[in-house]
Amino acid sequence: MVMRRIVLVLVLAVVAVACGSPDVIGGGGEPAPTTTVDPDQPVDSGGDEPIVEPGEVGSIPEPRPPIDGSVDGEVWVTGADVRVMESFPVQIMLDVTGDKPTPCHEIFWTVEDDGEVIAIEMISQVAAEQTCAQVIEPFTIAVPLGSWAEESREIELNGEVVGSFET
């Protein structure tokens, strides 16, 4: 019995030694390189494009308007929630869930603000020549409604009131 345990321990030791240890990143036993970033310095996005400044307070960001020449489709909205982000000025998003006619359809929207109501019209579109599986596909999308300070609005989606906010 003791001999079996000794043999088992020796076999396990041989297996452990045979497996070895993994190479360190970069090889040669050198530690992996690290980068130190000063938290008080701006970070470069790495691209040639400048960082886009947020829109003017009390204005709605650019919508995602439909594309001319595409075939319009429906969206079946199953839920819409107004999200008020804790910032100053307050930023508002409308989180929309629903279904679109096919996986090839993309969601587009236009937004109008009359000072009391933000009206969003949402549709789906697909390229006229595109063929696609005819299966309903669920979607979730966040529609940015801008930054607001000391304002209130009711929000309509495709003609139905879905919420409101007051800052």
Image (tube, grey):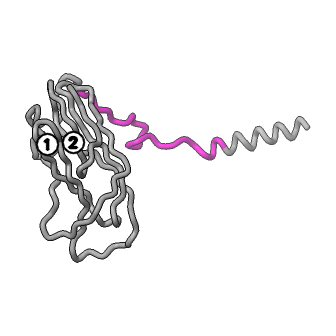
Please name the amino acid that badge 2 sits on. Pro
Question: For residue 61, which numbered disc appears in the image?
Answer: 1
Q: Quick one: quadrant of the C terminus?
A: top left
Q: Viewed as shown, does residue 55 lie left or right of 77?
A: left
Q: Quick one: quadrant of the N terminus?
A: top right
Give the Cα separation between the discs numbered 2 and 1.
Answer: 7 Å
Q: Is the magenta stretch mostly helix, strand or loop?
A: loop
Locate residue 3, reporting x and y percent. 88, 38
**Lower position in the chain sequence, tag 2 or tag 1:** 1
Label 2 with label 1: CB-CB less than 8 Å? yes
| Residue at horizontal 41 percent and vertical 43 percent from the top | 27
The reply to whether residue 53 is visible in this rendering is: no
Q: Give 123 or 144, whichever is nearer the viewer.
A: 123
Disc 2 secondary structure class: strand
Locate residue 36, reporting x and y percent. 27, 28
Please name the amino acid that badge 1 sits on. Pro
Q: Is residue 27 magenta?
A: yes
Query: In the figure, residue 46 lies in which quadrant?
Result: top left
| Residue at horizontal 25 percent and vertical 48 percent from the top | 157
Question: For residue 34, which numbered disc appears in the image?
Answer: none
Magenta residues (range) = 16-38
Q: Viewed as shown, does residue 37 lie left or right of 48?
A: right
Question: For residue 144, which numbered disc appears in the image?
Answer: 2
